[in-house]
Amino acid sequence: MKIQKFLRLKQGNWKRLEELLAKIQKQKLSSLFPSEIRELSRRYRRATSELAYAQTYFPGSETTRYLNDLVARTYQHIYPGGYLTWRGVGHFFLYEYPRLFRKNIIFFLISLALFLFSASLGFYVVQINPGSAVMLIPEPVLEKIEQKEMWTEDIFNVFPPALISSVIFTNNISVTFFAFALGILAGLGTIYILILNGLLLGMISSLCCLHDLAGKFWIFVLPHGLTELSLIFIAGAAGLILGNSWLSPGDYTRKESLRQGGREAVRLVLGGVPFLIVAGLVEGYISPSSFIPAYLKIGLGIVLVAALFVYLGKSRPRKRRLPGSPP
Amino acid sequence: MLKFSSLLLTDVFKKLIYSMPIEPEINIPTPENIHLHLELAGLGSRGLAYLLDTIIRVGLLGALFLLFYLLNQFFHLWKNSSKWMIVFLVIPLFLLHWFYFVLFEAFRNGQTPGKKVLRIRVIKEGGYPIGFLESVIRNLLRIVDFLPAAYLLGICLIFVNKRHQRLGDMAAGTVVIREQSYLPIVSPEGETGNFHQSPYESLLARIELNSQEYELIARFLQRRAELDPSHRGKLRRQLIQSLFRRHNINFTVNMPNAPGIQEEFLEHLLGFHSKERK
């Protein structure tokens, strides 16, 4: 077939396909009538065979390039990716997130261990040599502690809790994002973040012990800290998954393994966001409050973290037994 | 020893150069068993798009800053304004920093405003539109591609990688492509004039068009109104001259140097060859 005949016979199909695409672009795929959907798929398939013909008989021609582009533009509507729906988000939080956590609990335990190790190291080092705290703890905080006062009181007297909460949870979410993303450097970035934060907590608690602030310190930290740290460890697990996925790909290629690891890890991090917001609110409203008695604060902290782990450990979809399958 | 090592070095360079993609394209096999070719976006357009997006983000933040400042000037809402400023801007800054790219790419089909201007788009390696998770992965990993400074790692990877992927693209399985806008070539419809009475009848019958020439003439006639006159005349003459040369027809003898006639000739030629001939 000569190109002129090809053009004359086929361009009606292309024109109509362009019209349908313009309609999808302007509104949405769901705005098409059922008949139009059927037409789209029929005309798409026709265009693919026309493209195959053009690639064979008119290679390098403008018509082939145009058809290639037209088919590519239609392709993404014929084979769309997954859409983000409220239902999907609900399902994620009800079942998928806890399942992902349980599946990767080993990485969670590794980041927990890294943190605890560096925290006790920090604690020990400061107990032996209190001067070493200068390395990580900022000057104004050090001064406050040496005056046997909590450094938090200043901040909480100036700003209302709502704003402090937002500063805190945006910061914590950023930390989890960093812990996830830096994991791609063979997990080293994640390990660095975990150890740094562990040292920081260890050193500061050690300093507070030395200056008779231990009680105040733990009453401030525990209500939100347990939940917050658990989520940091989950983000640490996500970072380790990301690094591990391409370091030990198993039966997959490194690239494919990285992609699968990435999908799993990012869901672990994103799932933590709402919990971090809750922890931030507790840290802004409840932890610094001088009206709420200490045992209530600590009780709340324990209840929160227990609830988190019960949810992560227990939640699973109801088994639907297929008829005829063994009970 | 020196010679040995320098040899090795040239080998490495050769290997690097040969492994670089000559045609920055990806090939997508579809379930219909055909291969789609999509052109990959280069570093230049990606960099420019990022620059635009950064300007937009900074501009938005600046506008918020100004709003805060004006509100404070006129209504004196806050006493300790410099401290308050930080808190006021924390959430917008957080959202712009982490979610500007994520949300635009996830919900505007792979295009941030900057990418839209530069006509590039993020898609999955398989040619599918980018999903929410992919968008989060590739954009959270920006901070790693940024290392050690100014996207050095990402830029190096885009140079070396066959599909121009930075780390974020590799982990998410995405590529950035250039959007094409080819106009279809329209064959003259309805112009089923009787070319046997055409003044150029004898010439028309002597000329055989191949598909490239046909496309060229069709494209010229389609777009001639947009061309500036001198350029249009040059193209027109070149088209006819090369056709005549191929068929051993003397241009000066057979073609009067009048624009109207030359274009009419091309129209008739296209129409003549578009007609169904048995």
Image (cartoon, helix red, strand yellow):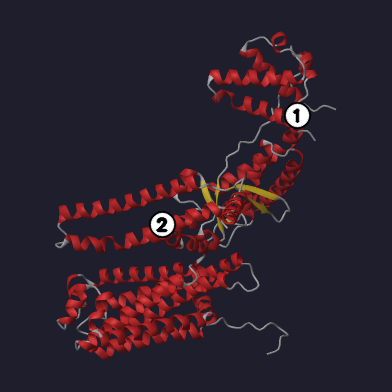
Between residues B7 and B84, which one lies in front from this camera angle?
A: B7
**Mark 1 closeness class: few <14, some 14–19, many ≥20 residues within 10 Å:** few
From the viewer's perspective, tell me whether residue A219 is left or right of residue A313: left
From the viewer's perspective, tell me whether residue B231 is left or right of residue A291: right
**In the image, residue B105 lies at what x, y percent?**
48, 55
**In the image, residue B70 lies at what x, y percent?**
20, 51
Q: Who's the residue at 66% across and 49% down the image?
A: B36
Residue linked to disc 2:
B100
Label ID, residue B210: 1
Relative to A220, residue B250 above or below: above
The quadrant where residue A229 appears: bottom left
Relative to A9, residue B80 above or below: below
Between residues A99 and A187, which one lies in front from this camera angle?
A: A187
Asked whether the beta carbons under mark 2 and mark 1 sit within 8 Å of each other, the answer is: no
Q: Secondary structure at mark 1?
A: loop
Q: Who's the residue at 65% across and 40% down the image?
A: A65
Relative to B249, residue A234 above or below: below
**In the image, residue A292 lies at what x, y percent?**
23, 85
The quadrant where residue A281 appears: bottom left
Spatial distance from mark 2 to mark 1, Cα to Cα? Answer: 50 Å
Of tags 2 and 1, which is closer to the observer?
A: 1
Q: Chain of mark 2?
A: B
